Image (cartoon, helix red, strand yellow):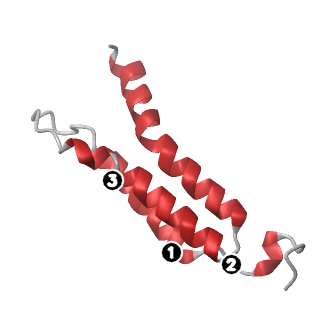
């Protein structure tokens, strides 16, 4: 296939990238203290969604799926700051 063909004609979405994106989202949703116990997760836990997003981007890029690579990288980089902003807006400073 030619590099000039649109992405939609290259096949399905990259499964590994999707799995890593969903894992990044799931781990981000584990960060807030939903039960109110006050138990915090380790600080390095905030880095995992970024790493998963970047690994997914790398895998998508290797598969020739630039759009999915950009989406995975952006998702990984935005999840934790977006969660922090949302919590601040909802619960106050």
Q: Residue at x 88, y 74 (%)?
A: 5
Bin the neighbour count of mark 2 within 10 Å (Cα to Cα): few under 14, some 14-19, many 20 and up.
few
Q: Is residue 26 above or below residue 87?
A: below
Secondary structure of residue under mark 1 = helix
Give the numbered dot on residue 16: 1
Picture coordinates of residue 65, whole percent (x, y): 69, 70
**Looking at this rendering, what residue extends furthest in the top direction?**
93
Q: Is residue 31 above or below residue 7?
A: above
Q: In the shown orientation, is residue 7 left or right of residue 28?
A: right
Q: Earlier in the sequence, mark 3 or mark 2?
A: 2
Picture coordinates of residue 73, whole percent (x, y): 56, 53
Residue 15 or 77: which is nearer the viewer?
Answer: 77
Secondary structure of residue under mark 2 = loop
Q: In the shown orientation, is residue 83 left or right of residue 63?
A: left
Question: How far apart, in angstroms, are the residues tagged by discs 3 and 1?
Answer: 16 Å
Secondary structure of residue under mark 3 = helix
- Check disc 2 and report the residue beneath it: 12
Q: Earlier in the sequence, mark 3 or mark 1?
A: 1
User: Which quadrant, please, contains the N terminus?
Assistant: bottom right
User: Which quadrant, please, contains the C terminus?
Assistant: top left
Give the numbered dot on residue 27: 3
């Amino acid at each position: 296939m030619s590099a000039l063909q649109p992405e939609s004609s290259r096949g399905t979405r990259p499964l590994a990238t999707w799995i890593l994106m969903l894992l990044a989202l799931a781990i981000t949703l584990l960060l807030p203290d939903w039960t109110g116990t006050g138990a915090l997760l380790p600080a390095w836990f905030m880095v995992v969604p970024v790493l998963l997003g970047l690994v997914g981007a790398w895998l998508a890029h290797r598969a020739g799926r630039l759009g999915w690579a950009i989406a995975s990288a952006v998702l990984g980089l935005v999840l934790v700051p977006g969660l922090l902003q949302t919590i601040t807006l909802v619960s106050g400073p």
